[in-house]
Image (cartoon, grey):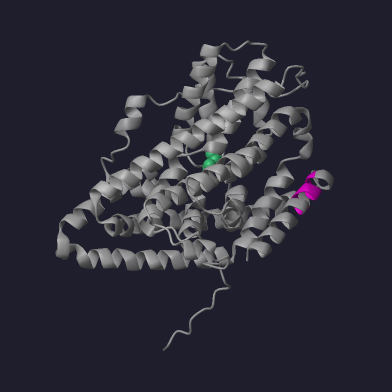
């Protein structure tokens, strides 16, 4: 299945790039394919994924919390996951700042004539409001809006109270577990059509995003990609090896499908169903840990985004010839950790939060306009890094709690998606 998705992904990428180069002004291709077929299939595919997120997280979390059965242990898993999220993000930022300061991108940058230089910074939310917003005043609205932190808050409280009911809550817990099974089956069905969805998304993205936009920005672009790759393959894998005591190669192999989903949708949020499935079924992490760590990670843990924001900050400071002091760097690190927590797992959100960081350290927010042109591709790359970080933390926490089946983890075929066989419905 993964091979099939990769083949379709590369086909989409090639076709999109060809269209961008040779058929950029052919109205027929643009109207019927790029903005027609590819657009429709791509959006339907993303909607199919998003459709699964809220019910899957809800039922899985009820099963997970009731599976832990112990509020103290739940708190411990939560604290471990949160600390690891912060730690991996801080490592990502340090690495990105270190590489950027060494290479100094943008020192001799010449503004391309006619380049867009307008960017209006959105108002960042106050920290008090962020805290208040964790608790939904109306859970139905939270579920309808897909507000992940509010859903997690409500569902955990609901599940804890369900546990408190003892035997009387049993049927509901069993019901939630069965609903979770149905949702996981729906993930399998959606995954079986993934190759076509991924193809359409890639073809559309690359038809619209020409390679020529990237060339003048190659310094910035190259550093972000270099650091993303280093963070995923070196930093995160070292943590996995030493803290999680598992084989990183096996991990990376099993992560591939989820990374492709993240890459083609540019959304950690929409990829939650696939990340959750990968971590549970392919890597053997118990539902009690995965159901909690993965959705939380997709919402607050953004290593890849933090990397882009770090490099962008140094790049913009250089372009405008602004020297950053040590205090500036410390402020930047603090702000970037906060920004990556506050960034929503949706396409392009990282760029908006970058405005907040630039504002805080007194750098010109208009600088964002310069990097906007290449952000689409970087968004794809960093989203793949973001969800890899979530899965790494889920495995490490599960390992420390004895909540992972190493037999499943080490079995290369565990949980692989097979073509769906439709059942015969008896009349
Ligand atoms: N697209 C990213 C994600 O969903 C967020 C961002 O960096 O824009 O993880």
Residue drawn 51% across and 58% down? 278
Is residue 123 highlighted in magenta? no
Q: Quadrant of the N terminus?
A: bottom right
The image quarter containing residue 55 is bottom left
Write down the quadrant of residue 379 in the picture: top right
Query: What residue lies at 49% left-to-right and 65% top-to-bottom?
Result: 408
Query: What span is colored magenta in the figure?
Result: 15-20
Per the image, is 18 magenta? yes
| Residue 330 spot, x, y in % from top left | 50, 18
Left or right: 155 as drawn, with respect to 402: left
Q: Quadrant of residue 134?
A: top left
User: Which x, y percent locates residue 56?
Assistant: 40, 58
Q: Among all residues in the image, which is located at the extreme bottom?
A: 427
Q: Quadrant of the C terminus?
A: bottom left
Tag count: 0
In what quadrant does ligand 1 lie? top right
Q: Is residue 297 above or below residue 419?
A: above
Foreground residue, 209 or 160? 160
Tell whether 63 sits left or right of 235. Answer: left
Residue pictured at 67% horizontal, 11% vertical: 321
- The relative height of residue 201 versus residue 93 in the rendered view (above or below) is below
């Amino acid at each position: 299945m993964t091979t099939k998705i990769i083949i379709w992904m590369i086909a989409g990428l090639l076709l999109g790039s060809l269209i961008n180069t040779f058929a950029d002004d052919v109205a027929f291709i643009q109207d019927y394919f790029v903005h027609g077929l590819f657009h429709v299939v791509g959006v339907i595919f993303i909607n199919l994924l998003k459709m699964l997120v809220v019910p899957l997280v809800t039922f899985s979390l009820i099963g997970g919390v009731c599976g832990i059965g112990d509020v103290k242990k739940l708190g411990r898993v939560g604290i471990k996951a949160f600390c690891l999220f912060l730690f991996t993000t801080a490592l990502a930022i340090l690495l990105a700042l270190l590489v950027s300061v060494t290479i100094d991108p943008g020192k001799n940058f010449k503004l391309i004539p006619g380049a867009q230089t307008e960017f209006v910074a959105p108002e960042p939310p106050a920290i008090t409001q962020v805290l208040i917003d964790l608790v939904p005043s109306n859970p139905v609205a939270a579920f309808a809006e897909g507000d992940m932190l509010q859903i997690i808050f409500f569902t955990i409280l609901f599940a804890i109270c369900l546990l408190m009911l003892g035997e009387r809550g049993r049927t509901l817990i069993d019901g939630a577990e069965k609903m979770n099974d149905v949702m996981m089956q729906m993930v399998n069905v959606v995954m079986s059509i993934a190759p076509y969805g991924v193809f359409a998304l890639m073809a559309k993205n690359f038809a619209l995003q020409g390679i020529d936009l990237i060339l003048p920005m190659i310094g910035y672009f190259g550093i972000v990609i270099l650091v993303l790759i280093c963070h995923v393959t070196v930093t995160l894998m070292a943590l996995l090896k030493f803290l999680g005591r598992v084989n990183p190669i096996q991990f990376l192999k099993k992560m591939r499908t989820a990374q492709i989903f993240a890459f083609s949708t540019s959304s950690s949020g929409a990829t939650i169903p696939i990340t959750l499935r990968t971590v549970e079924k392919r890597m053997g992490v118990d539902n009690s840990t995965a159901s909690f760590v993965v959705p939380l990670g997709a919402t607050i843990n953004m290593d890849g985004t933090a990397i882009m924001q770090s490099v962008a900050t140094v790049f913009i400071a250089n372009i405008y010839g602004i020297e950053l002091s040590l205090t500036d760097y410390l402020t930047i690190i603090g702000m970037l950790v906060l920004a990556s927590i506050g960034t929503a797992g949706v396409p392009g959100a990282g760029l908006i939060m970058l405005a907040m960081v630039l504002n805080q350290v007194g750098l010109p927010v208009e600088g964002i306009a310069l990097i906007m042109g290449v952000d689409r591709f970087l968004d794809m790359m960093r989203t793949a890094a973001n969800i890899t970080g979530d899965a790494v933390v889920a495995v490490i926490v599960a390992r420390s709690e004895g909540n992972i089946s190493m037999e499943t983890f080490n079995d290369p075929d565990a949980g692989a998606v097979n073509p769906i066989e439709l059942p015969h419905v008896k009349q």
